[in-house]
C-alpha cells in the first residue's frame, strides 16, 4: 500500500518553513520576462515557479495585466456573484498566548462566552438580515465550547442556515468528523505563519504553540469529509510573499490528496489590536494585498477568495471583481455583538461597518449578484 | 525534468513499450532495446497445445527490463484478479498493468470493473498501473484506492489517432498526485512528444512501433521524441501571449 | 479412459499423467515457460512434480506472450 506523504514533509522539502531570506533573494531575482510568461501561462493552474513570479517584486509593474487576467478568470468560473456570510463570535476566553491577538490569554480584558441560546439570538439577528451562511468563531475555550456544544448548536442552526462553518481552535480528525455529521460543512483554520521560527516567536504557550500540530489541521479537516477548507496566514507576521508560497503549496497538496474538498483563501491582514506593538510586524500595503490576491487567483481558478470586514469599504468594493468570491458584512467581532451591543473586546476592529443590506446594494450596483445561500446541507445524507 | 518515479522505483526512460503485435520475437527484442525503455508489458494467454510456440519471455532480459504483465483479455474484475495472481506466481513480480476491456471493438476499459479489481489487487500488495479512459474523477478514485499511476488513453488501442482526449487529459495531469502515463492510441513520435509536453509523466506505445514497416527505426524515433519533449520542458518554453482586453483600469485606485 | 479439461477442451488419456510435470512432458510443453492453474488454484512451478492429477480436473495452462 503506497503511503501518502504528509504536508509537513512537503513543506520541509520545498524549504518553505525556514530560511526565508534565501527564498526572498530568489524572488528578488525574478525578471520581467518571467512575470510576463507567468501571467498568461495556463490560466488558473498552479506551479511553484508561476506563483513565485507573480508574487515577486518584479510583478508589481504588472498588476494591471494580472488584474485583467484574474478578473476574466474569476468571471468564467464564478460568474458575477459574491457569496455573503456572517461571523458569530461565541467565546473570547482563551488558553493560548498568541502575541498578535486581542484575546491573548495574557491580556487583561473583559471576556465573554455565550450559551447556546445566546448564540442563537445573535444568529436570529443575522438571519433576519438575509444571511444563510454562518461562521462560528471562538477562541480556545475547550471547557465551555466543546464539540458537543458545537454539535448541538449546529443542529439548531441548520433550521435557519444552509451553510455552517467554524473558525475555532483546532480539533482532532474524529472531532471534525463528528461535527460534519452534526451539520458543519466547512472549517477555517489559519496556519498564521508557515515559518517555524516566526511561529514559535508569536505562539508562546497553549495548544496552538505546536507548529506541526497546526500544520496537520487542514489534512484532518479534509480527511473528516468537510466540504470547505479555509486556509490563511496572518499577513504581517513574516514576509507575505513567502507566506503566499506556503499557502499555495498547502492548497495544492489538499487539492491533490483530498480532491472532493473545496479550498479557499482568506487574507487576514494585521490591524491594530489592544495592547499590541505594531512596529514589530511587516505590514502589507494595499498594493501588496492586491498582488497576493491576484497571484493566487491566477494559480487557483476554483479556489474561494474570502475578504472580511477587517478591510475598508473602499478596498472591498474594488476587490470584488478582482477575484474575491465571498465576503462578510455587517459583522460584529465580539461575542453577543449583534444583540446586546456591549463593549466587550472585539477580536479585530471592523473597518467596513456597513449593514449587510448596504453591502448587498453596493454589490448590485457594481453588477454583481449577492448570493446568500450557496449550499444546502439538506442535500447531503445526514 | 526530474527522473520518472513510480511506486518505489526510479526510471531513466519515460517511454514504456508494449510487446504485442510484433512480427517476430527477435524484432520485438531489438525494438525494445533501441527504445531505451526500462518497462515492457507482456500478456498471459492460454498455451496453444497443438502448436509449440517459442518462448517470448526468453527474448526479454529480465535484469534490464521491468516486466509488466497486462491483464488484457480479462472482461471483468474477477478475471483480471485471477490473471494478476497467476502472473505474480509465475514471475514473482508484483507490478501489474490492469486492463479490463470487455468491449471487443474498441477495447475500451470498463471503469467499474477496473476500480473493483484495483481495490482488491492493491490490498493484495500489487503495484497497480490501471488503464482507463481519460476520466478525471475515475483517476482520483483509483488514486484513492492506492494505484501507483493512472494510465489514461489518448485514443482507442491500436487506432494510432494520437491525443483525442486532450481536455480531459489536461485535467488529469493537473489533478493527479500519482504519475500519469498516457497509454493507447499514440501513433506517431510527435504524439508522444505532445503528451510529455502537456505534462504527462510517461507514455506507453505498442501498435505504432510493432506495426511500422521498420519497427526498430520507429522505436528509436519514439525514444528521440520523448527525449526532445523532456528537453523542451526543461527549457521552459514561453506561452502564447494573450492580449489583455482593453477596458478601464482595475488597479488604478491603488495609491501605495 | 481418463479425461482432463485443459484450456477449455476435454482431452482424453489412456493413462492419466501422474502429476502436472508429467502432463506437460506428455504435451511436449516446456514447464519453465508455463503458468498453471488446477481447478481454479494457482500451482507454483516448484510444485509441478508434486501436484497429483485426478480424473476430470480442470487445468489452465498459460504462457507469456507479447501484449500491449
Image: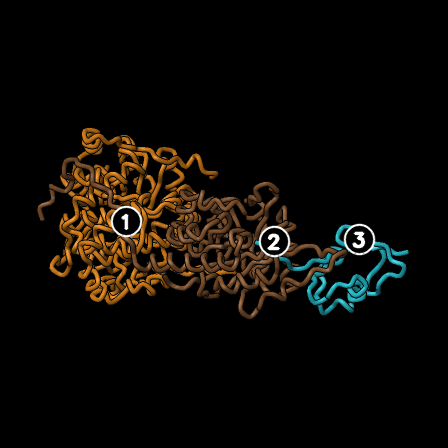
In the figure, is residue C34 to the left or right of B198? right
Q: Residue furthest front?
A: B213
Q: Secondary structure at mark 1?
A: loop
Res. A103 in view: no
Q: Residue at x 20, y 45 (%)?
A: A66
Find disc 3 in the rendering and name its residue: C5
- Give the brown chain's letter: B
Find disc 2 in the rendering and name its residue: B71
Identify the hue of chain C: cyan
Q: Residue B25 or A27: which is nearer the viewer?
A: B25
Separation (CA) of disc 2 from disc 1 = 40 Å
Separation (CA) of disc 1 from disc 3 = 63 Å
How far across and how far down the image is residue B84, in percent?
Answer: 62, 57
Instruction: Determine if marks 1 and 3 fall on one subunit.
Output: no
In the figure, is residue B156 to the left or right of A195? right
How far across and how far down the image is residue B133, in percent?
Answer: 50, 45
Q: Nearer the viewer, mark 1 or mark 3?
A: 1
In the figure, is residue B31 to the left or right of B5? right
Could you tell which of marks 2 and 1 lies nearer the N-terminus? 2
Q: Chain of mark 2?
A: B
- Dot 2 crowding, Cα within 10 Å, few <14, some 14–19, many 20+: many
Q: Chain of mark 3?
A: C
Res. A149 in view: yes
Q: Residue at x 26, y 32 (%)?
A: A370
Find disc 1 in the rendering and name its residue: B239
Q: Residue A340 or A95: which is nearer the viewer?
A: A95
Amino acid at each position: 500500500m503506497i503511503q501518502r506523504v504528509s504536508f509537513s514533509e512537503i513543506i520541509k522539502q520545498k524549504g518553505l518553513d525556514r530560511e526565508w531570506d534565501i527564498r526572498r533573494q530568489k524572488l528578488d531575482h525574478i525578471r520581467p520576462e518571467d512575470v510576463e510568461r507567468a501571467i498568461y501561462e495556463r490560466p488558473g493552474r498552479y506551479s511553484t515557479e508561476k506563483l513565485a513570479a507573480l508574487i515577486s517584486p518584479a510583478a508589481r509593474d504588472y498588476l494591471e495585466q494580472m488584474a485583467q487576467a484574474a478578473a476574466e478568470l474569476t468571471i468564467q468560473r464564478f460568474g458575477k456573484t459574491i457569496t455573503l456570510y456572517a461571523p458569530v463570535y461565541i467565546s473570547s476566553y482563551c488558553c493560548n498566548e498568541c502575541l498578535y491577538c486581542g484575546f491573548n490569554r495574557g491580556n487583561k480584558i473583559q471576556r465573554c462566552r455565550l450559551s447556546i441560546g445566546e448564540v442563537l439570538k445573535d444568529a436570529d439577528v443575522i438571519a433576519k438580515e438575509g444571511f444563510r451562511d454562518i461562521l462560528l468563531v471562538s477562541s480556545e475555550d475547550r471547557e465551555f465550547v466543546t464539540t458537543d456544544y458545537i454539535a448541538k448548536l449546529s443542529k439548531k442552526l441548520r433550521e435557519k442556515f444552509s451553510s455552517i462553518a467554524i473558525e475555532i481552535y483546532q480539533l482532532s480528525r474524529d472531532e471534525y468528523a463528528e461535527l460534519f455529521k452534526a451539520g458543519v460543512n466547512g472549517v477555517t483554520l489559519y496556519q498564521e505563519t508557515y515559518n517555524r521560527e516566526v511561529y514559535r516567536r508569536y505562539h508562546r504557550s497553549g495548544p496552538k504553540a505546536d507548529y506541526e500540530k497546526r500544520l496537520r489541521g487542514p489534512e484532518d479537516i479534509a480527511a473528516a469529509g468537510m466540504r470547505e477548507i479555509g486556509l490563511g496566514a496572518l499577513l504581517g507576521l513574516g514576509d507575505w510573499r513567502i507566506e503566499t508560497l506556503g499557502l499555495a503549496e498547502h492548497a495544492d497538496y489538499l487539492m491533490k490528496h483530498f480532491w472532493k474538498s473545496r479550498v479557499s483563501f482568506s487574507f487576514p491582514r494585521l490591524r491594530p489590536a489592544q495592547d499590541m506593538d505594531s512596529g514589530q510586524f511587516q505590514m502589507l500595503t494595499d498594493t501588496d494585498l492586491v498582488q497576493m490576491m491576484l497571484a493566487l487567483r491566477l494559480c487557483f481558478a476554483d479556489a474561494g477568495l474570502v475578504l472580511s470586514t477587517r478591510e475598508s469599504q473602499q478596498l472591498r468594493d474594488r476587490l470584488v471583481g478582482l477575484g474575491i468570491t465571498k465576503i462578510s458584512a455587517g459583522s460584529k467581532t465580539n461575542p453577543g455583538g449583534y444583540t446586546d451591543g456591549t463593549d466587550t473586546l472585539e477580536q479585530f476592529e471592523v473597518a467596513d461597518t456597513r449593514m449587510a443590506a448596504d453591502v448587498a446594494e453596493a454589490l448590485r450596483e457594481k453588477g454583481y449578484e449577492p448570493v446568500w445561500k450557496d449550499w444546502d446541507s439538506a442535500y447531503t445524507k445526514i | 525534468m526530474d527522473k520518472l518515479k513510480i511506486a518505489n522505483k526510479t526510471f531513466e526512460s519515460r517511454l514504456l513499450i508494449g510487446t504485442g503485435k510484433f512480427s517476430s520475437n527477435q524484432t520485438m527484442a531489438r525494438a525494445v532495446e533501441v527504445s531505451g525503455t526500462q518497462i515492457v508489458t507482456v500478456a498471459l494467454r492460454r498455451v496453444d497445445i497443438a502448436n509449440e510456440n517459442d518462448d517470448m519471455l526468453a527474448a526479454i532480459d529480465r535484469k534490464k527490463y521491468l516486466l509488466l504483465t497486462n491483464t488484457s483479455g480479462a472482461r471483468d474484475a474477477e478475471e483480471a484478479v485471477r490473471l494478476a495472481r497467476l502472473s505474480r506466481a509465475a514471475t514473482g513480480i508484483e507490478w501489474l498493468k490492469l486492463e479490463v476491456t470487455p468491449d471487443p471493438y474498441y477495447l475500451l476499459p470498463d471503469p467499474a470493473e477496473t476500480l473493483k479489481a484495483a481495490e482488491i489487487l492493491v490490498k493484495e500488495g500489487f503495484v497497480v498501473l490501471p488503464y482507463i479512459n481519460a476520466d478525471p474523477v475515475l483517476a482520483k478514485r483509483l488514486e484513492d484506492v492506492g494505484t501507483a499511476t493512472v494510465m489514461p488513453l489518448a485514443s482507442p488501442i491500436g487506432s494510432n489517432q494520437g491525443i483525442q482526449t486532450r481536455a480531459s487529459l489536461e485535467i488529469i495531469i493537473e489533478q493527479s498526485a500519482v504519475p500519469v502515463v498516457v497509454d493507447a492510441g499514440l501513433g506517431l513520435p510527435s504524439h508522444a512528444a505532445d503528451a510529455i509536453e502537456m505534462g504527462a509523466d510517461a507514455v506507453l506505445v505498442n501498435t505504432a512501433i510493432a506495426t511500422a514497416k521498420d519497427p526498430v527505426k520507429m522505436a528509436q524515433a519514439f525514444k528521440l521524441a520523448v527525449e526532445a519533449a523532456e528537453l523542451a520542458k526543461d527549457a521552459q518554453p514561453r506561452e502564447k501571449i494573450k492580449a489583455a482586453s482593453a477596458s478601464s483600469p482595475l488597479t488604478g485606485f491603488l495609491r501605495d | 479412459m481418463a479425461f482432463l479439461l485443459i484450456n477449455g477442451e476435454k482431452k482424453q488419456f489412456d493413462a492419466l499423467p501422474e502429476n502436472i510435470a508429467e502432463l506437460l512432458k506428455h504435451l511436449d510443453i516446456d514447464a519453465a515457460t508455463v503458468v498453471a492453474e488446477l481447478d481454479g488454484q494457482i500451482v507454483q512451478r516448484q510444485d509441478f512434480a508434486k501436484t497429483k492429477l485426478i480424473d476430470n480436473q480442470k487445468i489452465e495452462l498459460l504462457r507469456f506472450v507479447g501484449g500491449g
